[in-house]
Image (spheres, grey):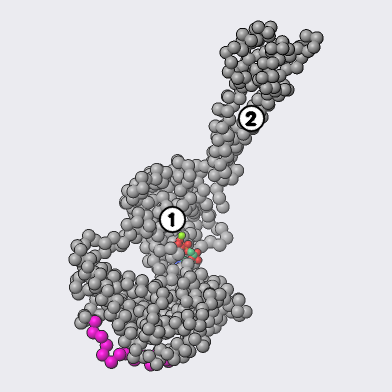
Amino acid sequence: MPVNKDPKPPRSRTIANLVLWVATGLLLLNIAFTGFSGSQTAKEPYSMFIHRVQDQEVLKASVGQDEIRYQVKTTDGQPGEIYTTTPIFDLQLPQLLEDNGVEFAALPPPKGQWIGSLLSWVIPPLIFIAVWRFFLTRNGGGPQGALSIGKSKAKVYVEGEAGKITFEDVAGVEEAKAELVEIVDFLKTPKRFTDLGAKIPKGVLLVGPPGTGKTLMAKAVAGEAGVPFFSISGSEFVELFVGVGSSRVRDLFEQAKKQAPCIIFIDELDAIGKSRSSSSFYGGNDEREQTLNQLLTELDGFDASDTTVIVLAATNRPETLDPALLRPGRFDRQVLVDRPDLKGRQAILAIHAKEVKLADDVDLQQIATRTPGFAGADLANLVNEAALLAARRGHTQVQQADFSEAIERLVAGLEKKSRVLSDKEKEIVAYHEVGHALVGSVMPGTDRVEKISIIPRGMAALGYTLQLPTEDRFLRDEAELKGQIATLLGGRSAEELIFGNITTGASNDLQRATDLAEQMVTSYGMSQVLGPLAYDRAQRNMFLDNGMGNARRPISEDTAKAIDTEVKTLVEAGHQRALDILQTNRSLLESLAQQLLESEVIEGDSLREQLKQVMLPEAPLDLEGVPPAAVTTV
Ligand code: ADP
Ligand code: MG
Ligand code: ZN
């Protein structure tokens, strides 16, 4: 229900229309005048005019700079036709005219010319103003006209509306929920707190990755407390016209205070709240700065204890916010809304699965296990994808198989049946993928291999090996990271071993392996040579804002060289390890690749049974004698 309580007549639109009409009228007038002065007379060459003068045919003439008008005599000496000609600069002309008895005078400026020149100055600005007003009006939106551009576009949701959202609809973020339950108490019974002399918090900032349910949770707070909920998104503040953003903020708070107790929710706060110092990097953005200043003023300008207005805001980029926003008395409470853990995912799945018909074989816990890193929005999407798939397959209920396929789609992208590989390419891809699978099945810390496929998927993958985790992992140790590097190089190693040749297909694998090795050396302190130092500065999640993302500490040339060598050694070791494993299991590699070429997909028990046969090389390489599992990463 958008608020619209401004009864003012659309005055400025009338003005704009008037201006347009006047401008058009004047323009037509101007055309009429200029037309008049040049019409109705025949034009003759200047030589003809001179001849007529010399033959004494001309009665009178008006001589102007650009034009001479003259009237000839009829045969009986009466005034006749009027002609014009374009003169040539001729100082003798007056003498000639006089000698031939022509009555002459200078030409008066043509009628209407002054209007013309006036109009040519006046009209363009008028048109410009008219157009400007027109856009301003449209920007203000709706019937209120241009004067309303400063009015806030906040939407208000009021208690009792259909589809009310409560805490029941939010799961997997229990800590955040607990914090917000407290806010609901403030809104419901402010007196209980103020009587004790406690100050009610003014601003609560919800911080977390996209899709974790920040917006949802803010709505739930309003739903639970049963108070009006003014919602506006920070990106709506970023407007073309200077001064609009700040007046919108002022207006939003004005409306809210009238309706207290209530909640103001500013979504995507980072759009206005970006640090002023970081924005001045590009010379600043005055408009946003003004809006931010207004917001700060408003936050300071009311006392939550007597007007129970609580400002909730959400952002996924807290590090870019201006520190002034986070000061006590403003957004002094920060609530982390993080990606859900295993139990949380299961609970979120349960909420969204209520909306679809589930078959008996569906195991939500298993689905939750296989979707680490999924945020609430991803899980909601997953349930929907599974339902769509089930419908397409003609099922009446959503089955576990539909969920499995949906996960695969979300993880690896859509199957691309149209991308046809040649037989040779298929063979290479088959060996490449089996290479990953074989190495991955024996490396520590890599996820279980669920499926190998050579059906192209997504943007770039020609084939893929799907490894799904069996548990949430928060720490990885050194041996596991080395295992991952080896697994990533498994594909390329298989190509080398079988074809003695390398294709471009492994570039993404190499990229990831090298990144991982570099992190081990520069962030996790896993290199004996370089020691437990972090050569990368703590990653400040600055995204693309100022192009200073992942900065490296100032290092000496020697250190740079040492890093390069260490990274190379790590990747090379992984490569060697992969080659060793594949060599040891060469017959299995060949047979799996052949199966894959025939069926395009190997998965399930058949795959698991075969991967169990993978043997480790006789003498596993001792990688630089580092005691395994000595170091963990966070
Ligand atoms: P955010 O604002 O954090 O980016 P949203 O609140 O817009 O995320 O979440 C988008 C949708 O994803 C919600 O409408 C809801 O359907 C689903 N969702 C996200 N998080 C959760 C959660 N914790 N519990 C239940 N559903 C969730
Ligand atoms: Mg949101
Ligand atoms: Zn690969």
Judge whether residue 137 is colored magenta: no
What residue is drawn where x is 59% and y is 45%? 142
- The magenta segment is 609-623
**Mark 1 Cβ and ligand 2 under 8 Å apart:** yes
The quadrant in which the C terminus is found is bottom left
| Percent coordinates x, y for residue 441 in the rendering | 37, 85
Q: Toward which corner of the image does residue 572 lie, by quadrant?
A: bottom left
Which disc, if any, is residue 289?
none
The single residue placed furthest to the right in the displayed view is 76
Local SS, label 2: helix
What residue is drawn where x is 50% and y is 50%? 154
What residue is drawn where x is 69% and y is 13%? 53
Residues 526 and 232: in front is: 526
Local SS, label 1: loop
Return the residue at label 1: 268
**Mark 2 Cβ and ligand 2 under 8 Å apart:** no
Apparent side of residue 416 relative to residue 280 in the rendered image (left or right): right
Q: Mark 2: which amino acid? A: Leu
Whether residue 547 can be seen here:
yes
Return the residue at label 2: 27
Task: For marks 2 and 1, give the CA distance.
Answer: 48 Å
Magenta segment, prevailing SS (helix, strand or loop): loop
Q: Mark 1: which amino acid? A: Glu
Whether residue 6 can be seen here:
no
| Percent coordinates x, y for residue 547 in the rendering | 35, 56
| Percent coordinates x, y for residue 107 in the rendering | 63, 15
What residue is drawn where x is 53% and y is 54%? 158
Residues 454 and 251: in front is: 454
Apparent side of residue 186 relative to residue 358 in the rendered image (left or right): left
Residues 390 and 219: in front is: 390
Task: Name the N-terminal-most of marks 2 and 1.
Answer: 2
